[in-house]
Image (cartoon, grey):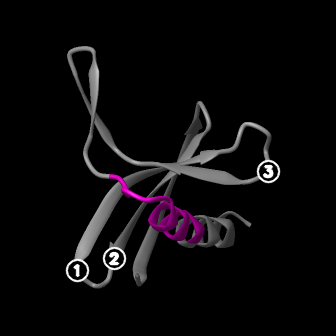
Amino acid sequence: MKITEIQITPIKANNGLVAFASCVLDGSVYLGSIGIHKRLDGSGYRITYPTKKVADKDFHIFHPINRQTNEEIEKAIVSRVEEIMS
């Protein structure tokens, strides 16, 4: 899987949320509104995928369906955000 065009948009920190990310997978799929959060222990960053709240239920807009894909996306985004934030 090739992850390209990683864009990071820093925001004013809000409950650990510090930025939003977008990227393109394999030159075919655009993923946006990925939340970037500071880890609670301060050891780095973690990402969350967008959801839509309807009544009292959260619906996932998109997310990886296996651990390997999630780790690759997170590694690419966190690497880019660490470049920007340092």
Tell me if mark 2 has few (under 14), some (14-19) or many (20+) residues whose alpha carbon lies within 10 angstroms of its own: some
Quadrant of the rendering where the N terminus is positioned:
bottom left
- Mark drawn on residue 25: 2
**Could you give the CA–CA distance between mark 3 and mark 1, rounded to whole angstroms?**
32 Å
**Could you give the CA–CA distance between mark 3 and mark 2, rounded to whole angstroms?**
27 Å
Residue pointed to by mark 1: 28
Q: Residue at x 63, y 71 (%)?
A: 79
Residue 33 coordinates in the image, percent (x, y): 35, 52
Where disc 1 sits, the SS reads: loop
- Above or below, 7 against 64 in this view is below
- Residue 9 lies left or right of residue 50; in this view the side is right
Is tag 3's residue or tag 2's residue first in the polypeptide sequence?
A: 2
Residue 39 coordinates in the image, percent (x, y): 69, 43
Residue 16 coordinates in the image, percent (x, y): 62, 37
- Residue 42 lies left or right of residue 18; in this view the side is right
The question of residue 85 being in magenta is answered with no
Residue pointed to by mark 3: 43
Q: Residue 55 occupies which quadrant of the picture?
A: top left
- Above or below, 74 against 36 in this view is below
The question of residue 67 being in magenta is answered with yes
Tell me if mark 3 has few (under 14), some (14-19) or many (20+) residues whose alpha carbon lies within 10 angstroms of its own: few
Where disc 3 sits, the SS reads: loop
Q: Are marks 2 and 1 in contact (CB under 8 Å)?
A: yes
Give the magenta part as a residue range: 63-75
